[in-house]
Image (spheres, rainbow, N blue to C red):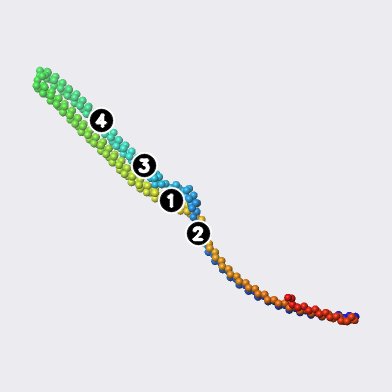
């Protein structure tokens, strides 16, 4: 008969200490600015499709085309008025010439009849070649010449008056045309200035419209980041294990003892 007694003693002592410290700091600063930006290429494209603004030479030609018909109409009206007046006066002069010729003819006819009557009467009395008869006929001739002269002089006076009227009409026509041309030059300068001002306003308005159409937005920002991190980890561990094993054997064969002991891990 054998008796075995086993005594096992185990002791484990473990100590672990961990010390961890972490410290962190983070700072971020961001700034963003949104601004209007102008697309020059788009602006030029928009402006190229807008109203074609004229140069000074083109504006001058345009203003002249606007006012020239009015000037031409005024000049033509003045010229027509003069032509009408001149024609009427020329006709008056022709009428006077015809009237003078008719009056002279009438005087000549009357003189011829009077002369014939005087000669017939003188012959009837036997005084056909007498000094009295010759004097009477000479007086009749003088009266005829005087009448014709008076008719001619009066006709010439009227002709002169009519000619003066024609000259006055021509002078008035020249003055009217000169005044119209002066007014035209003044009106042309004023119209040109008006067109320039109007075009300037239209251009400014069109430019503002084009700029508005070509504006976009762009963001411009700055970002600053500051980060600080500190980490500390401390670990302290110790482990102790003790194990004891005792084995006894009792029996006829004697005794056996076994001792087992464990220490700490290296």
Lateral position of residue 87 relative to residue 211, left or right: left
Q: Is residue 213 shown to the viewer in this render?
A: no
Which mark lies nearer to you, 3 or 2?
Answer: 2
Q: How much space separates mark 1 and mark 2, taking CA atoms?
A: 25 Å
From the viewer's perspective, is the residue at label 2 or at label 4 nearer? 2
Q: Secondary structure at mark 4?
A: helix
Report which residue position mark 1 lands on: 203
Measuring 72% from the left and 77% from the top, which residue is drawn there?
A: 239
Circle 2: element type: strand
In the image, which disc is placed on residue 35? Answer: 2
Residue 226: x and y in percent read 56, 68
Residue at the spot x=56%, y=66% of the render? Answer: 225
Residue farthest left in this picture: 131
Quadrant in the rendering for residue 235: bottom right
From the image, tell me which residue sits under label 3: 68
Q: Which mark lies nearer to you, 4 or 3?
A: 3
Q: Residue tagged by mark 4?
A: 94
Q: Earlier in the sequence, mark 4 or mark 1?
A: 4
Question: Callout 4 environment at 10 Å: few (<14), some (14 to 19), or many (20+)?
Answer: few
Mark whose residue sits in front, 1 or 2? 2
Q: Are marks 3 and 1 in contact (CB under 8 Å)?
A: no
Quadrant, the C terminus: bottom right
Give the CA distance from mark 4 to mark 3: 38 Å
Q: CA distance from mark 3 to mark 2?
A: 52 Å
Report whether 86 appears left or right of 58: left
Q: Residues within 10 Å of mark 3 (few under 14, many from 20)?
A: some
Which of the two discs, 4 and 3, labels the residue nearer the N terminus?
Answer: 3
| Residue for point 19% across, 26% down | 107
Q: Nearer the viewer, mark 3 or mark 1?
A: 1
């Amino acid at each position: 008969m054998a008796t075995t007694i086993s005594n096992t003693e185990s002791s484990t002592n473990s100590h672990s200490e961990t010390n961890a410290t972490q410290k962190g700091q983070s700072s971020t600063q961001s700034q963003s600015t949104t601004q209007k930006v102008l697309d020059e290429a788009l602006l030029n494209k928009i402006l190229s499709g807008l109203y074609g603004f004229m140069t000074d030479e083109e504006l001058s030609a345009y203003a002249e085309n606007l006012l020239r018909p009015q000037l031409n109409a005024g000049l033509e009206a003045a010229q027509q008025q003069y032509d009408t007046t001149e024609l009427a006066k020329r006709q008056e002069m022709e009428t006077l010439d015809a009237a003078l010729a008719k009056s002279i003819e009438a005087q000549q006819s009357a003189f011829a009849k009077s002369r014939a009557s005087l000669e017939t009467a003188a012959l009837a009395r036997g005084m056909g070649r007498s000094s009295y008869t010759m004097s009477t006929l000479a007086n009749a001739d003088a009266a005829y010449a005087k009448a014709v002269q008076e008719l001619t002089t009066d006709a010439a006076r009227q002709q002169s008056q009519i000619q003066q009227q024609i000259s006055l009409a021509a002078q008035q026509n020249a003055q009217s045309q000169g005044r119209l041309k002066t007014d035209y030059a003044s009106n042309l300068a004023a119209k040109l200035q008006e067109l320039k001002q109007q075009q300037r306003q239209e251009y400014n308005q069109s430019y503002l419209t084009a700029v508005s159409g070509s504006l976009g937005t762009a963001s411009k920002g700055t970002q600053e980041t500051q980060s600080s991190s500190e980490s500390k980890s401390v670990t302290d561990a110790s482990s102790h294990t003790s194990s004891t094993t005792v084995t006894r054997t009792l029996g006829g064969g004697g005794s056996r003892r076994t001792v087992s002991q464990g220490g700490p891990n290296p």
